[in-house]
Image (tube, grey):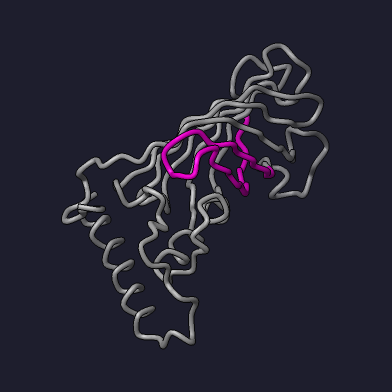
Amino acid sequence: MRWASNVALAVMASASQGALAHSPSERPPRLENVDTSYGRIDGDFVFAFSSGVSLAARGPRGAVDVRARFLDVAGLFVTYEDAFGGPSEPRRVFSAGADLRLVYLARWVQGWHWGKAYADLLVDSFSIELGAAWVQPQIASNLSRTQLHFAFGLEMPILPRASGPWLGLRGGLRWSDDALAQARTESPLDRAGFVMFTVGWHQVVDTGLVGGYSGRR
């Protein structure tokens, strides 16, 4: 873990030096005396917990989502969805994979921020998800089928800082092995889209796992 942390910090430092090498006329001016990380540099990880509803084929499902991101740039997600006896197909979904937020990294090291917390945090929250999903059809008793999971997401903070309550919107598609190999999409179990609305909490945490990382200190 320490070597990965050091590599990531080296990349950010190198990018920052490259940005400083350009003349002021070639890039937006940096905002003075404004914390454009909005608290994200106070720690090395962001942990996010949320719940909401996933709108899918034939009905909604309740959803619970947990995420952990290193420097709020890259991490992992786990999501569980359950129709609770409703008609949604599939009835239950368990998905997991990678969560990438590369817009924040690019904007922060270049100083391309507006200095307005809600706008900056909304744009920086743009995420790409790639992973796997295990689904339970209505007629099955367990998570018997596997799908490829791909999604995009945006979140809006309720307060003008990184740690606190957030509203989330995600949308994506899931494909079964048959859909990928044979282009067969006879039911939502072969290919299905979803839109998820969530309310949750983000917390910036200094775990001490990043050697030499000091945040504001």
Q: Is residue 152 magenta?
A: yes
Q: Which residues are magenta?
A: 145-173
| Residue at (35% x, 85% y) in the render | 21
Q: Is residue 70 above or below residue 89?
A: below
Q: Is residue 134 above or below residue 28?
A: above
| Residue at (62% x, 47% y) in the render | 151
Q: Position of residue 43 (x, y in %)?
A: 29, 46
Residue 128 visible at all: no
| Residue at (73% x, 31% y) in the render | 55
Q: Is residue 6 magenta?
A: no
202 or 209: nearer the eye? 202
Q: Position of residue 26 (x, y in %)?
A: 49, 86
Q: Is residue 177 above or below residue 197?
A: below
62 or 144: nearer the eye? 62
Q: Is residue 178 left or right of residue 101?
A: right
Q: Position of residue 24 (x, y in %)?
A: 43, 84
| Residue at (47% x, 32% y) in the render | 201
Which residue extends farthest top?
Answer: 85
Residue 147 visible at all: yes
In terms of secondary structure, what is the magenta stretch mainly? Answer: strand
